Image (cartoon, rainbow, N blue to C red):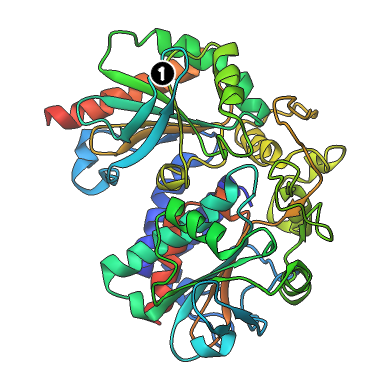
């Protein structure tokens, strides 16, 4: 969803409240949720959305000798969860992790750090060794051994693929999925956010741009399409920029899930990197407050 | 809490609809309540290029305003915007404002630094260009989606922001307006 749509939707909600319908706007939503339904219905998405139960999982923590499961958070902590791989070429995966980090810092500053967990699952564990993940965490600026941080590293790329795509319904594609070349970062795993957006046709206005460049490098289109949206100009054509050494065919759907302590999804944020971190943080605070 | 968010959404939303640019304040009378939020200093790494001295760089600058321009070399509309940005930047020469172009791409990793330099210089860049390793700056200033421009004062407050391509005049007007609002606060 592009920001303008979101803000327009927010405006509509605000107008309703001014008209005296605060109760209607503020009443809690589906069973088991704290937040009211999102402005846009995402329920047709492949990934879990508002009111859905979080899929169960059991994945090794890359920085602790233990399995992390969905159940350990029940009754204990709300959770922000995302999926990433460190060789994400457009630098957008760091932005996803940075959004979780911003929320973790807010939790620390506001004193709710024990009530919120931050879970990031790599879907490229063959490349994302604990050492690589530690470097990434350093870059982002968080301590992956902190009590409320869980960087999860499935046993191998096949397990990761199944977990993320099938259990969580989050589209990914790693070009070298079956035959990973650990030594060659360039040849490795471009992603294409568009395919992800396609899964979310009702959440954005990108559809018109999707034809014809699905295999091109992605960040361009991600940004470009949103820019088009804001500018209402349509150039229709996207060409791969020759500057990128290895445009490859890959997919990763940038999504963050906000889950309450009962394991119910309160929000999914498709195209999360286009959002403002403060939007996610406000929602998290509300959920933690119950 | 919830009610305040909704009302804030109304105020912010009304200004946004109809364009990519956001006027973040209606003027000094709103300063008390609607002062843009300040941001803590964040360090990024400047790259050696025309007009760009390599080394660590902190945003915000503690003495002058900063015009942040978020981009990626793979972003076509970022490339389209650059010549306009270059022309706009030249009109602020001598003013107490620094221009900083910022990429979150994995510079030196998947994307060679030379590709960033070439992209920047080929499109008229002649100011600081930097790498936001870890995307902290980009998340703090909503740098994604790019191309994104933000006029930031010495406290890290954003006084004008704009997403997408723009003409030179639109950029100059927006930046001037943002700088003027920031200056009004300083005078207040």
At 79% from the left and 42% from the top, the residue drawn is: A248
In this rendering, the answer to whether A206 lies above or below A107 is above
Position of the C terminus of chain A by quadrant: bottom left
Seen as rendered, the residue at the extreme right is: A212
At 66% from the left and 85% from the top, the residue drawn is: A56
In percent of width and height, residue A213 lies at 83, 38
Q: Which residue is mark 1?
A: B52
Q: Does any portion of residue B9 appear in the rendered image?
A: yes
In this rendering, the answer to whether A162 lies above or below A141 is below
In percent of width and height, residue B137 lies at 41, 42
**Front position in the image: B128 or B163:** B128
In this rendering, the answer to whether B36 lies above or below A136 is above
In percent of width and height, residue B162 lies at 48, 32
**Front position in the image: B130 or A203:** B130
User: Crowding at label 1, few (<14), some or many (≥20) Cα neighbours within 10 Å?
Assistant: some
**Front position in the image: A132 or B86:** A132
At 79% from the left and 29% from the top, the residue drawn is: A236
Seen as rendered, the residue at the extreme left is: B188
For the residue labelled by badge 1, is the local secondary structure a helix, a strand or a loop? loop
**Front position in the image: A212 or A18:** A212
In percent of width and height, residue A121 lies at 61, 68
- Classify residue A99 as left or right of residue B77: left
In this rendering, the answer to whether B122 lies above or below A33 is above
At 56% from the left and 55% from the top, the residue drawn is: A9
- Classify residue B180 as left or right of residue A122: left
- Classify residue A23 as left or right of residue A177: left
What chain does badge 1 belong to? B
Q: Does any portion of residue A269 appear in the rendered image?
A: no
């Amino acid at each position: 969803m592009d920001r303008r749509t979101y803000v327009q939707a927010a405006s509509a909600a605000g107008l309703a409240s001014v008209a005296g319908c605060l109760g209607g706007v503020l009443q809690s939503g589906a069973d088991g949720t704290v937040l009211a339904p999102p402005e846009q219905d995402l329920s047709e998405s492949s990934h879990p959305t508002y009111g859905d139960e979080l899929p169960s999982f059991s994945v090794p923590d890359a920085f602790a000798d233990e399995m992390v499961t969905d159940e350990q958070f029940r009754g204990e902590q709300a959770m922000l969860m995302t999926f990433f791989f460190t060789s994400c070429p457009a630098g957008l995966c760091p932005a996803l992790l940075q959004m979780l980090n911003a929320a973790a810092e807010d939790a620390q500053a506001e004193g709710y750090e024990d009530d919120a967990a931050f879970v990031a699952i790599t879907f490229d564990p063959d490349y994302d060794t604990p050492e690589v993940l530690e470097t990434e965490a350093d870059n982002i600026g968080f301590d992956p051994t902190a009590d409320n941080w869980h960087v999860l590293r499935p046993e191998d790329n096949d397990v990761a693929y199944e977990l993320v795509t099938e259990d969580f319904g989050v589209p990914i594609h790693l070009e070298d999925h079956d035959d990973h070349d650990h030594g060659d970062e360039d040849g490795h795993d471009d992603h294409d956010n568009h395919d992800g957006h396609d899964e979310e046709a009702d959440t954005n206005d990108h559809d018109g741009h999707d034809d014809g460049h699905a295999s091109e490098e992605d960040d361009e289109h991600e940004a470009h399409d949103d820019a088009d949206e804001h500018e209402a100009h349509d150039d229709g054509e996207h060409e791969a920029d020759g500057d990128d050494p290895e445009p490859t065919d890959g997919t990763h759907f940038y999504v963050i899930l906000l889950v309450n302590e009962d394991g119910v999804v309160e929000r999914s944020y498709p195209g999360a990197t286009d959002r403002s971190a403060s939007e996610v943080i406000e929602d998290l605070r509300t959920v933690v407050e119950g | 809490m919830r009610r305040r968010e909704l009302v804030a959404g109304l105020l912010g939303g009304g200004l946004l609809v109809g364009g990519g640019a956001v006027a973040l304040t209606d003027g000094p009378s709103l300063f008390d309540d609607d002062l843009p939020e300040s941001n803590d200093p964040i360090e990024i790494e400047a790259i050696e290029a025309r007009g760009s001295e390599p080394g660590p760089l902190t945003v915000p600058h503690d003495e002058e305003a900063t015009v942040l321009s978020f981009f990626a070399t793979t972003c076509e509309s970022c490339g389209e915007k650059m010549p306009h940005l270059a022309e706009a930047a030249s009109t602020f020469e001598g003013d107490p404002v620094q221009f900083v172009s910022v990429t979150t791409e994995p510079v030196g990793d998947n994307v060679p630094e030379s590709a960033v330099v070439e992209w920047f210089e080929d499109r008229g860049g002649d100011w600081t260009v930097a790498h936001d390793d870890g995307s902290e700056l980009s998340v703090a200033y909503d740098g994604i989606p790019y191309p994104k421009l933000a006029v930031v004062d010495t406290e890290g407050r954003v006084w004008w922001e704009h997403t997408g391509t723009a003409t030179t005049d639109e950029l100059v007007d927006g930046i001037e307006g943002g700088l003027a609002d920031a200056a009004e606060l300083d005078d207040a």
